[in-house]
Amino acid sequence: MNSNNPEYLKKTLIENWRKEMEAARLYQLSADSESDDRRSNIFQQLADLENKHVKMWEDKLSELGVDLTSLEPPEVNIKDLSQGQVFERIEAVETNNMNWYQSLRNVMDDEAVVRIIDEINEDEKKHGSLDDMLQPETKQVKRRLNSLWGKERWHKRESGGWVGDAIYGVNDGLGAIFGIIAGVAGFAHNDQTILISGFFGALASTLSMGAGAWLAAKSENEILESELSHERREIQEDPEHEVEELKLLYELKGLSPEESNRIATQVSKDQENFLNTMAQEELGIHEASKSNPWSSALFGSASTFVGAIVPLLPFFFLHGWVAMVTAAAVSIVAHFVVGALKSIITVRGWLVSGLEMTLVGIMVGAVSYGLGELGTLIFGVHI
């Protein structure tokens, strides 16, 4: 946007002012009508923040010679709205404003205006989602539970920790190698060919899973370190803002403003402790969040090899169709066991999970065998 066009710039800044006025008015009306003191206080703080943004645009408009008394604020009324509808309207206004500023940021060439937009965007990020802040009994509680679960090693945030790595490793090895030997059996009625193909397939799957687990854990740690570095920089550059943020986080847990302020101030006296507290309370990051790439690789590769070797075992002792049928039976049973074990890290029942995995295993084996038989027709050979 060409800031050399003063009239166009004024119209744009007036629109910015109106958007912030609407948000401020919504928060203020919500604070005035809210019977719960804690929620009313949060609404009031958000209203104050939006009024700060209003003042920014008013100052800029005054610099441009705009008569502020001539500006007409937007009409805002929440009398006929339920609490849920008020939340929805505020969320809609905040989302609309965020999108507006993002678009404006890309076309605005006035450095002073860009700085104001950046400051507003930072403030908006700080107070976060209205849903999280004002409905702690839903999303806020879930976030807190995730934070608590993360302290237990097997409750790692997404992967399920070493238990999840082991179960999914066994599942990957079992499914992949059962598919390989079924496909090779359909193409080559030769025990040695099936065994060799399956064995080297198992080695490849083991190495692949180990490497993948190592890279995934390392990448996750790098992301956590990046978030910690960003939080550390915020503490160093604007400690007062971070103390205020921690205070609000404690208030959202039900502590009084006075108690929240006392604890936040005490925590902030030790910068390292302050960083660790902010990382845990705001980001859900703590010591147990970090993965050990080498242990992940070990669990992933070892469990994959264990799962992969199961379909091959009958071929070490049996021959021909007996070996193949036995391998299929053992693999199907193993699929059920692995599926049942998955219920440890999921909310599904062990029987349903086991039967689902069994069905998947049967389908993989049948399709792979059918493709092997098809291969004999396409290539005209049968080893």
Image: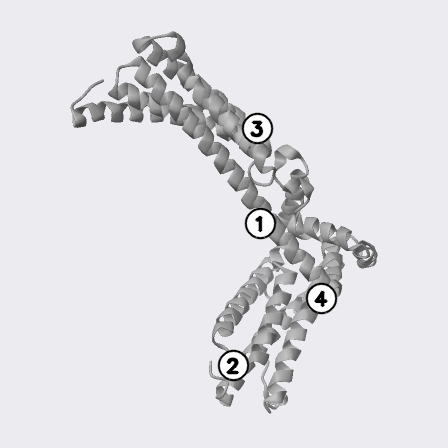
What residue sits right under mark 2 in the picture? 12
Q: Nearer the viewer, residue 236 or 31?
A: 236
Query: How far apart, in angstroms, are the residues tagged by discs 3 and 2?
Result: 56 Å
Secondary structure at badge 4 equals: helix
Give the amino acid type for the residue marked by disc 4 in the picture. Answer: Gln
Looking at the image, residue 183 sits to the left or right of residue 250; the answer is left
What residue sits right under mark 3 in the picture? 344
Give the amino acid type for the residue marked by disc 2 in the picture. Answer: Thr
**Residue at image point 61% right, 75% down:** 21
Secondary structure at badge 3 equals: loop
User: Residue 322 falls in which quadrant of the image?
Assistant: top left
Assess whether mark 2 and mark 3 are in contact (beta carbons under 8 angstroms). no
Query: Where residue 122 sits in the image (x, y, percent)?
Result: 62, 66
Give the amino acid type for the residue marked by disc 1 in the picture. Answer: Ile
Label 3 vs label 1, nearer the camera = 1
Query: How far apart, in angstroms, are the residues tagged by discs 1 and 4?
Result: 32 Å
Q: Which numbered disc covers residue 223?
A: 1
How dense is the environment of label 3, judged by Cα within 10 Å: few (below 14), some, or many (20 and up)?
some
Query: Where residue 72 sits in the image (x, y, percent)?
Result: 58, 84
In the image, residue 178 sits, relative to residue 89, either above or below, namely above
Query: How far apart, in angstroms, are the residues tagged by discs 4 and 3?
Result: 43 Å
